[in-house]
Image (tube, rainbow, N blue to C red):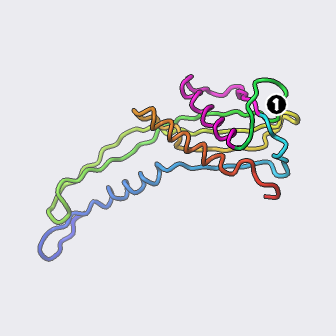
Amino acid sequence: MLYRMKGGVIRIAFGIGLVLLMGGYLAAQQIMTNYMPGTDFSKFKTYKWVIIEGSEQPDQILDQQIRQAVEAQLASKGMMKTDNEPADLYVAYQVSITQQHQWNAYSMGGPWRGGMATATSTTIQIGTLDLDFYDPGPKQLVWKGQASKTLNPSKDPKKNQERLNNAVAKLLKGFPPKPGK
């Protein structure tokens, strides 16, 4: 878009600014939780990992990272992991990796000097973690949480683990739900 003003020409890259703004918005983690009303979460003291039949499982490294992040949060809430039966709660997760286009804009010069701007597209992986808690007695889902844009791989394994730990902490912040809520 070209505008003429006294003393010169201003080039405004409105579209690129909008793409950058939307790119920043789309990159934010989103956390959603839900639970079965009337569930007495105070009765859950132990938990056991289970695998949801038919779900796609990640590689062994990511599996360990997810389990460690969840286990740390549950331990901080006084829950104990067990590999034996009976367990008070079954914990399972699923992951989903999708692709999204990210636009990167570069500017040379400035709007007052008549600079140019270019934009390039990159495909990034967007990962969602679904965490489910089941009451094994009635075999009923009692709590569900989802953290999107959580499993986005980068070249830095430490950064990947920090992003996952932060997402799981946000995800389990309100767990267990307070009675009467």
Direction from residue 162 to residue 40 in the image, left or right: right
In this rendering, the answer to whether 58 lies above or below 161 is: above
Counting from the top left corner in percent of width and height, residue 147 is at 59, 44
How crowded pointer 1 is (Cα within 10 Å; few <14, some 14-19, many 20+) is rated as some
**Helix, strand or loop at mark 1:** loop
Q: Residue at x 72, y 49 (%)?
A: 34
Q: Nearer the viewer, residue 33 or 65?
A: 65
Q: Residue at x 42, y 53 (%)?
A: 24
Snapshot quadrant of residue 55:
top right
User: In the rendered structure, which amino acid carries the disc numbered 1?
Assistant: Ala
What span is in magenta? 47-76
The residue positioned farthest toward the bottom in the image shown: 6
Snapshot quadrant of residue 168:
top right
* The C terminus sits in image quarter: bottom right
Snapshot quadrant of residue 92:
top right
Q: Is residue 65 magenta?
A: yes
In this rendering, the answer to whether 31 lies above or below 141 is: below
Direction from residue 71 to residue 4 in the image, left or right: left
Q: Residue at x 14, y 77 (%)?
A: 6
List the residue tagged with mark 1: 87
* The N terminus sits in image quarter: bottom left
In this rendering, the answer to whether 14 lies above or below 129 is: below
The residue positioned farthest toward the right in the image shown: 138
Q: Nearer the viewer, residue 66 or 134?
A: 66
Counting from the top left corner in percent of width and height, residue 152 is at 48, 38
Q: Is residue 164 magenta?
A: no
Q: Residue at x 83, y 33 (%)?
A: 136
